[in-house]
Image: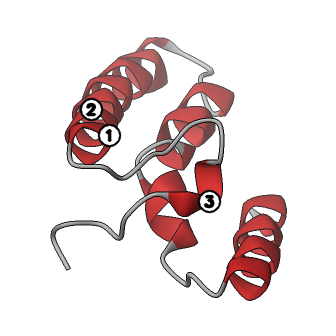
Amino acid sequence: CLVFASLCFVVSSITGNVSQVDKLWSITPMVYAWLAVVDARTFLMAILTTIWGLRLTYNFARRGGYCFPEFWKGDEDYRW
């Protein structure tokens, strides 16, 4: 968590685009959910979180949220 927060802060400071956290908002919960798998219940939770995260990531990407290869240049989250 501290690594993601630090990364967002540094990239936001360099680029002047404070919406960098929007890019990780849909990806980070999937990572944490899979790190927490210890039994069948948490496995189901990780699957559902991944489905939710993929949906969010897809919607954000199709509206210009991600820009490759310059990841930091994407638009702000359209819901704001």
Between 71 and 77, the one lying in front of the other is: 71
Mark 1 to mark 3 CA distance (whole Å): 13 Å
Mark in front: 2 vs 3:
3
Q: Amino acid at mark 1?
A: Ala
For residue 71, side relative to residue 25 (left or right):
right
Q: Amino acid at mark 3?
A: Trp
Q: Are marks 2 and 1 in contact (CB under 8 Å)?
A: yes
Q: Identify residue for label 3.
A: 72
Q: Amino acid at mark 2?
A: Tyr
Instruction: Please determine whether, in this image, residue 53 is positioned above or below residue 22.
Output: above
Mark 2 to mark 3 CA distance (whole Å): 17 Å
Q: Residues within 10 Å of mark 1 (few under 14, many from 20)?
A: some
Q: Identify residue for label 1.
A: 61
Instruction: Name the residue at the top extreme.
Output: 40
Disc 1 is placed on an element classified as helix
Between 15 and 43, the one lying in front of the other is: 15
Disc 2 is placed on an element classified as helix
Q: Identify residue for label 2.
A: 58
Indicate the quadrant where residue 80 lies.
bottom left
The disc placed on residue 40 is none
Instruction: Please determine whether, in this image, residue 64 is positioned above or below residue 44.
Output: below
Mark 2 to mark 1 CA distance (whole Å): 5 Å
Percent x, y of residue 42: 46, 26
User: Which label's residue is closer to the chain start, 1 or 3?
Assistant: 1
For residue 7, side relative to residue 51 (left or right):
right
The structure residue drawn at horizontal position 70% and vertical position 70%, both measured from the top left corner, is: 8
Instruction: Please determine whether, in this image, residue 39 is positioned above or below residue 1.
Output: above
User: How many numbered discs?
Assistant: 3
For residue 57, side relative to residue 35 (left or right):
left
